[in-house]
Amino acid sequence: MDYTKFFSKITSRRKINLIRQLTHLYITRQNGVSLAGGMPNISTYPLNDISMTYNDVTVELNKQEISAVLQYGSSQGYEPLLEKWKEFQKTWHSPKRNDWDIAFTCGSMDGCEKVFQMLIDENDPVMLQVPTYTGVIGALAPLLPDVIEINQDADGIIPEEISKKCEEKLKDGKPMPKLLYINPTGANPTGAVMSEIRRRKVYELAHKYNFLIVEDDPYCFVHFLDKQPTSFFSLDTDGRVIRMDSFSKIISAGYRIGAITAHKDIINKLIIHISSSILHASCLSQVFLYKLFESWEQQEFEKHFKEIQKFYQDRRDMMLTMIEKHLNGLAEWYIPQGGMFFWIKVTDVNNIMDLVMNKCVPQGVFVLPGNAFNYDSSKPDCHLRLSYSYASLEEMDRGISIIAKILREEVAKKK
């Protein structure tokens, strides 16, 4: 594919950071002598030993690895981790092409923002899965795109809506959408897992109407299905999928490491941006991830993922019991197939924002109103997002009972 038409104006204005380029070459060349970079001398740092324990496995860094975590690194990422992650992508997704590459970012949200900046100019039409995560909305809004909302149901986004919107653009002679942003597995906030049929249909539409797919998949391994969902990356025959992975839900949110997998031309543009913004993702986090990946075999990862899935599925089921107990007759919902949230439709309230901010929060119950997940947050919304990931079971029950009491009082006022 020729990606020129997809890149934003700001992307064409970015300049290569020669210092970062030479740093990468120095790191990857043995016995090189660096008189170029302003690298601090690590002997001045007060850190001598670094170790961490994963379950029962203690990871201790050797002298060379300690030097790597204390010093500036490559903008693309820690080379051993890059190679290891490529192996995993091949194992998990069986990509149909071999012209892809990887870059690490400060969490997948950082990667998402950089991808948007790389592709979107003001007034560019982009398709957005709605409702969608507030951070994604916050990253999109300053770019002032022409947002085309694509609705979803319990099976994920609806392909027919994509067809309808694209055909309308063609009929009116207006610019076609550059991209579709999608969170296909355990969608935030709905918990929907996109069906296999719909995934394949959406990819066919991307080929037909020539748009890129930004596949944001932080809940890839947090689903409650018998079979691992097929990724868009695994379907990609054209090089039009930009995949974002996160370690926050499976290893550590505090590591702040995300991975972007895409065609080499896209990754090269991304690295130029990284080299003049964050410089690189945390070397310490990258090395610790690599050491874990080095020590675990494939079956250990699969066991870990199964444990995560069971943990969150059990909590989902417990919250479902509490929702049925307290909210029956006050709200509607479907059972999420992945992720960490219930998406609750309150039946007798037109706009939930006031109740959340002026009734729930003052009583110590913190929930998110559906307004937060709309691109236009001023639109009335009757949904609540309830998270079952963190609160204790007693806290869940108490919180939902307070919400139910507030809703009953509100309904009584209208009678």
Image (cartoon, grey):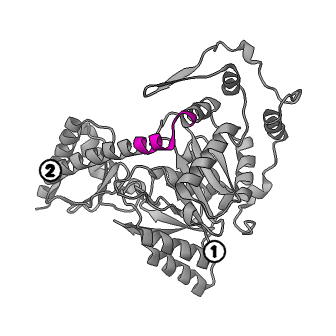
Q: How many marks?
A: 2
Which sits in the foreground, 156 or 148? 156
Label 1 or label 2, whichever lies nearer to me, is 1
Q: Is residue 301 above or below residue 292?
A: below
Mark 2 crowdedness (10 Å alpha carbons): few <14, some 14-19, many ≥20:
some
List x then y, in percent, for residue 18.
85, 41
Circle number at residue 100: none
Quick one: SS at disc 1? loop
Which sits in the foreground, 53 or 38? 53
Q: Please identify the quadrant where the N terminus is shown.
A: bottom right
List x then y, in percent, for residue 175.
64, 76
Q: Is residue 413 above or below residue 126?
A: above
Residue topped by disc 2: 326
Disc 1 marks which amino acid? Asn
List x then y, in percent, for residue 157.
43, 68
Q: What is the CA distance from the residue labelled 1 to the residue labelled 2? A: 47 Å
Residue 276: in sight, yes or no? no
Q: Which residues are magenta?
A: 294-304
Magenta span includes 393: no
Residue topped by disc 1: 210
Magenta span includes 302: yes
Quick one: SS at disc 2? helix
Which sits in the foreground, 214 or 203? 203
Disc 2 marks which amino acid? His
